[in-house]
Image: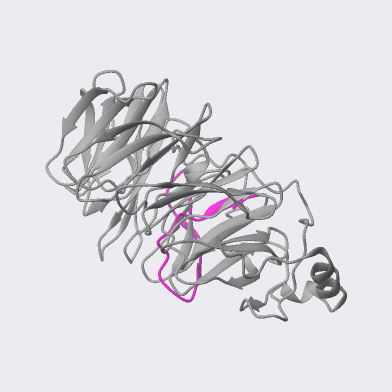
Amino acid sequence: MIPPDRPTRRRALLALAAGGAGAVGGCLGGGPEEPTREEPLDPAVGGAPTFQYDRANTGDAGAAGPVADAGAEPTERFRVRTDGPVRASPAVVDGVVYVGGGRRVDALDATDGVRLWSTAVRGTVRSAPAVVGGTVYVGTRGDRLYALDAADGSERWHFDANGPVDAAPVVSEGVVYAATRATEGRVYAIDADTGAERWRFGTAYRVISSPAILDGTVYVGGWDSAVYAIDADDGTERWRIGTDRPVLSSPAAADGTVYVGGNDETVYALDAADGSERWTHGTNGIATAPAVVGGVVYAGTETDAGRVYALDATDGTERWRTEAGTAVTTPPSVADGVYIGHRDGSVAAYHRGDGAERWRIGTNGGVRATPTLAGETVYVGSTGGDLYAFDRSGESD
């Protein structure tokens, strides 16, 4: 573990004296003059500790995010350069944004983007971090799962997997569940404190789907055209359901149902207990991982004629659909609106009730990671290598 940008306390104070507030709205390049500090300005900013906000991947951000009023586009609060393309959602906990880009994990002040620490890892990061109990858990394409101290980025342990860990890990009751995109795919259960393996489950092919956990069961999609339900305690298979094409998206689980988007242009609702089909809904392209909030399932399609769908969670009937004008490349984040990233580098907010587009704002690359909502801010990474914070501060710094 090489922490090239981690400040000493003296460095942090000197940097602040030199004008640490200059990071607001700026582009931080990781150089020696970059302002740094040790503690976040506002520890109250948070509520997004893991991919899609909770261990069931519901996508429910609560009341977070800027109000999605029509015509009231948010402004750029800050923009921070990372080590490379950002392809996974940031986590926001206790005033800190944790994000992976390139071969590095960064901790940034959620208010102004000033860097708190940076830690180099083996392999590029495509895994969204999970921050639980003062530890940051994140996978890499270097076949590792890392546990880093959330306060200073120091390595607590790492776990050597059988292949790249692209899927976001999920933490539940002292166990980290992680999957690999190796040719022989695996789902691992790893002790959150020690990094010791508790069990492993083999699939027929790669897994890049982030696990969802509901009522003692781990649900995950497989590149082998299947959805799996695995006992969280011992790793035994509870059921397996085949699909027509690979399932690369992550399941969302709620109210006894597992919702998943397939490469076969279908959104599935499966009974969580036995995998039986409750309903399906056809789409116009590869379906993203869904979000399920307030009895509605939201999903998009990754096709040039991208769409956003709102489906009744009970029977799959279509409440509305919206033409996005470009491919939808992220699962939805749902709060006062439905927030989604697009292939053309834009982030858009859609009305929850009718799907009308409220606003759209651009970045310097494609958006492949779900926008994360915390406080009144949208945090989003781009394949151009920047992390953005958009809000209604009234400032366009």
Q: How is this picture coloured?
A: one colour
Left or right of 27 on screen, residue 111:
right
The quadrant in which residue 356 appears is bottom left
The quadrant in which residue 201 appears is top left
Q: Nearer the viewer, residue 295 or 151?
A: 151
| Residue for point 54% across, 52% down | 372
| Residue for point 21% across, 54% down | 285
| Residue for point 76% across, 48% down | 43
Task: State whether residue 179 appears in this view.
Answer: yes
Give the image location of residue 105, x and y in percent. Answer: 55, 60
Left or right of 359 on screen, residue 125:
left
Relative to 136, say whether 366 is above or below.
Answer: below
Relative to 339, say whether 361 is above or below.
Answer: below
* Residue farthest to the top, as pictured: 273
Give the image location of residue 8, x and y in percent. Answer: 77, 65
Tell me where the magenta segment starts and ends, as one range. 350-374
* Residue farthest to the right, as pictured: 17
Q: Is residue 299 magenta?
A: no
Task: State whether residue 73 appears in this view.
Answer: no
Relative to 324, say whether 289 is above or below.
Answer: above
* Residue farthest to the left, as pictured: 244
Q: Nearer the viewer, residue 46 or 303?
A: 46
Q: Is residue 370 magenta?
A: yes
Q: Quadrant of the C terminus?
A: bottom right
